[in-house]
Image: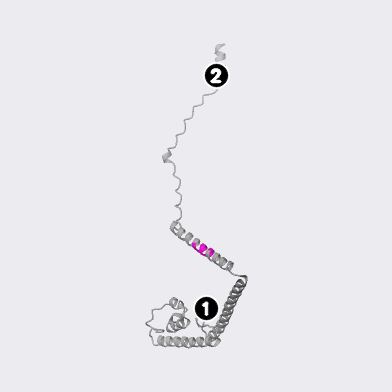
């Protein structure tokens, strides 16, 4: 009986499962390293640049506010009649400025028409150096420029046909086109343009 019980127990007993070996821990040093992040983009402005920009903006805004305060104080110290006169003077100034600009625009169209008839196309900044409110003076300036322009072109063509480097304008001049455009006096600027017409021939 003992032998039979022993065999029964052996028959229904769980088979021995071999204990699986623990997986080998991965060496942390052998793990692939995470890719390094890209370096931060370089700042377009330095802190000093930003400080200067902010300071300039604050100064400009303060200047506007100070001007507004002074204007308000000036008006506050005026009588009603003085304020009325001041408003009328300002309106007259604006009207005069509008009239002047309208006259200049009209003369600029006339000047542009004269030049176009001669197949001459000039940038607006150069065209305006010849334009005044007076139609006769504007026409005289444009005609003078046309003669000088055509003479310079003809001289340049003649020199090229001769195989020589064309010489236009004043050879001793050191002025640039930008320098000429900055001349405040109209007549002086026109004289400089005539003496340095080569700066304007190629639309440079």
Residue 187 falls left or right of residue 7: left
Which residue is disc 1 drawn over? Answer: 124
Q: Nearer the viewer, residue 121 or 21?
A: 121
Q: Provide residue 136's location: percent of width, then percent of height.
A: 54, 88
Q: Provide residue 131's location: percent of width, then percent of height.
A: 52, 82
Furthest toward the left, the residue is: 172
The magenta stretch spans which residues? 59-65
Tag 1, which secondary structure? Answer: helix
Q: Nearer the viewer, residue 129 or 54?
A: 54
Residue 92 falls left or right of residue 41: right
Q: CA distance from mark 1 to mark 2?
A: 113 Å
Which residue is disc 2 drawn over? Answer: 10
Q: Mark 1 or mark 2: which is in front? A: 1
Dominant secondary structure, magenta:
helix
Q: Provide residue 158's location: percent of width, then percent of height.
A: 42, 88
Mark 1 and mark 2 residues within 8 Å of each other at the beta carbon: no
Position of 11 relative to 154 (above/below) = above
Residue 173 quadrant: bottom left
Which residue corresponds to the image point at 55% horizontal and 64% vertical from the top-left?
Answer: 69
Position of 189 relative to 78 (above/below) = below
Which residue corresponds to the image point at 55% horizontal and 13% vertical from the top-left?
Answer: 3
Q: Nearer the viewer, residue 202 or 196?
A: 196
Mark toward the start of the polypeptide (1 vs 2) = 2
Q: Nearer the viewer, residue 107 or 1?
A: 107
- Checking the image for residue 98, the label placed there is none
Quadrant occupied by the N terminus: top right
Which residue corresponds to the image point at 43% horizontal and 76% vertical from the top-left?
Answer: 179
Position of 83 relative to 170 (above/below) = above
Position of 65 relative to 203 (above/below) = above
């Amino acid at each position: 009986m003992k032998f039979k019980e022993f065999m029964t127990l052996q028959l229904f007993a769980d088979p021995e499962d071999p204990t699986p070996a623990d997986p080998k821990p991965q060496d942390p040093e052998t793990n692939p390293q995470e890719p390094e992040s890209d370096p931060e983009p370089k700042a377009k402005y330095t802190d000093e640049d930003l400080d200067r920009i902010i300071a300039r903006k604050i100064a400009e805004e303060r200047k506007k506010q100070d001007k507004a305060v002074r204007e308000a104080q000036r008006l506050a110290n005026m009588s009603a009649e003085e304020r009325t006169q001041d408003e009328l003077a300002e309106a007259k100034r604006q009207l005069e400025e509008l009239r002047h600009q309208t006259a200049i625009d009209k003369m600029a169209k006339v000047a542009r028409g004269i030049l176009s008839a001669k197949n001459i196309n000039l940038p607006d900044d150069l065209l305006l150096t010849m334009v005044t409110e007076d139609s006769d003076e504007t026409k005289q300036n444009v005609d003078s420029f046309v003669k000088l322009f055509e003479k310079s072109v003809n001289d340049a063509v003649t020199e090229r046909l001769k195989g020589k480097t064309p010489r236009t304008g004043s050879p001793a001049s050191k002025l640039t086109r930008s320098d000429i455009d900055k001349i405040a006096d109209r007549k002086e600027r026109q004289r400089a343009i005539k003496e340095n017409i080569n700066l304007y021939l190629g639309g440079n």
